[in-house]
Amino acid sequence: MNLDDELRAALRREDPSPGFAQRVVARTQSRPARKFWLPRLIWATALAAMLVFGFVGAFEYRQMKAERAGRDAVLALRIAAEKLNMTRDRVLRRESADSREN
Amino acid sequence: MRRLFLILLVAAWTAALLPAQLLQLRITGLDGLASKAKETVDITLDSNLLQMAGGFLAGNGKDKDAKDIKALLAGLKAITVRSYEFKEDGQYRIEDLEPIRAQLRTPGWSKIVSTQSKGEISEIYTRTEQGKMVGFAIIAAEPRELTVVAIEGSIDLNDLSKLKGLGVPAIPIPDQGKKGKQE
Amino acid sequence: MLTQAAAIPEMLTDDRERFAELVREHQAMVFSMACRYLRNRSLAEEIAQDVFLQLYRKLPSLESPEHVLHWLRWVTAHRLIDHSRQQKRRPQSPLEDAPEPAAADSMDGADPLLAHTLRELVAALPENARVVMILRYQEDLDPMDIAQALDMPLATVKSHLQRSLALLRDKLSRKRGVGK
């Protein structure tokens, strides 16, 4: 077996967790509906199903939003720390240079 | 003269009553830089998102760093970061920072550190109320990188400076600055 | 089959259930690209959802099922690269510093340990090389298609492939003697 084949095997596609498509559709619910041409009964049934999935989708969406907020917060604080220490170092270098001159 | 005095008195009194959110630093005037930057970091987290972030880190951060970050987040109300990295010099002007610096010259904000050398400017500002820090801002301008960080809320700069293995001692907070120089 | 249907705007923009079908048709591709790139399933699902939401808005302007496929690959690849650049300030382990893979018992092509190792090594590649490798070995695109998908010069795509494969071979051969 050569590396190409092993890479193809290792990187073959896999599906996301069950209900992925429903979750995506649930998120589209917040958008204004475009023209509906489905018969009313089918539309009502689809709407009821989407409401159910919508609750599930909303909860999972909130979880993902929390994860993204967590990642952003970590990055923001790391950037702040980096610049804080960079500034501190510059001040210390300047003071060190000043004291050498004196 | 009396009228002028009354106007100033009313203005000062009104400023003292300004709700905290009106004193929040708005990072503005930098929107056009994203299209010129090779890398952009654009983060805006309000108190709601910070709360969610804290909840996420509480459940997912097992290492000390996550605990430290969660502790830092605890006192915060908002974080805003705009950071741009450019391929070449001259992609922004220092004047682009003027809308931000103008806000940082208003009462309540103090510049505690300022360095300038070889085209690099670093400034740190804090805002205090009743002796307690309630805001923090950094402007770091380099030839190919511009970063502005605005944090609203209570944060310990010493703890922030220790974040993630940078391994440098804590920055002196304003009332300890003179002690640091004497050492 | 959805791909045999008529013009996309007419069919899909009115009908969320058919959009769900479209998502199911392409979800493995989008999700897997993100998952192989990020090595994080939940983040991969989040990004995949964002891509499909963007597709939902974009559908009226897409002209054919092939256009959808090309568009999805393009958007997914660029979102992943942008995400990676935003995270760049975090400590990263370049491939050269990646730990040597543990020796496995079997040289079988279906060796799960080897597959896991390869996925880890690919995920440690630099961002552009990583997405090139994923498009090559997950999507089975040839270098010209990859260059079009990423709007990248063909020579650059080939260079990424050659260098990445050489790096992977080097990492693996130290432990396993895996051939070419």
Image (spheres, coloured by chain):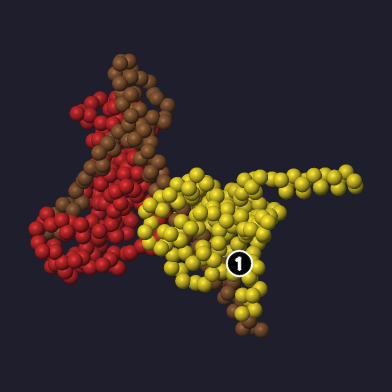
Residue drawn at point x = 15 percent, y = 66 percent? C103
Q: Can residue B98 be seen by looking at this rendering? A: no
Number of marks: 1
Residue drawn at point x = 34 percent, y = 48 percent? C43
Colour assigned to chain B in the rendering is yellow
Is B43 left, or right, of C87 in this rendering? right
Chain letter for the brown colouring in the rendering: A
Is C65 left, or right, of A3 in this rendering? right
Residue drawn at point x = 42 percent, y = 62 percent? B65
**Residue B158, position in %: x, y?**
54, 66
Compared with residue B179, is residue C62 higher up or lower down, i.e. above or below?
above
Circle 1 sits in a helix, a strand or a loop, which is it?
loop
Is B119 left, or right, of A3 in this rendering? right
| Residue at numbered disc 1 | B173
**Residue A82, position in %: x, y?**
49, 64
Q: Residues within 10 Å of mark 1 (few under 14, many from 20)?
A: some
Q: Chain of mark 1?
A: B
**Residue C116, position in %: x, y?**
20, 57
Compared with residue B176, is residue B138 higher up or lower down, i.e. above or below?
above
Is B136 left, or right, of A46 in this rendering? right
Q: Can residue B112 be seen by looking at this rendering? A: yes
Q: Quadrant of residue C25?
A: top left
**Residue C83, position in %: x, y?**
38, 51
Q: Quadrant of the C terminus of chain C?
A: bottom left
Of B99 and C147, nearer the camera is: B99
Chain letter for the red colouring in the rendering: C
Of B173 and B143, nearer the camera is: B173
Q: Amino acid at mark 1?
A: Ile
Q: Quadrant of the N terminus of chain C?
A: top left
Which residue in the rendered view is the most extreme toward the right?
Answer: B1
Residue drawn at point x = 71 percent, y = 54 percent? B107
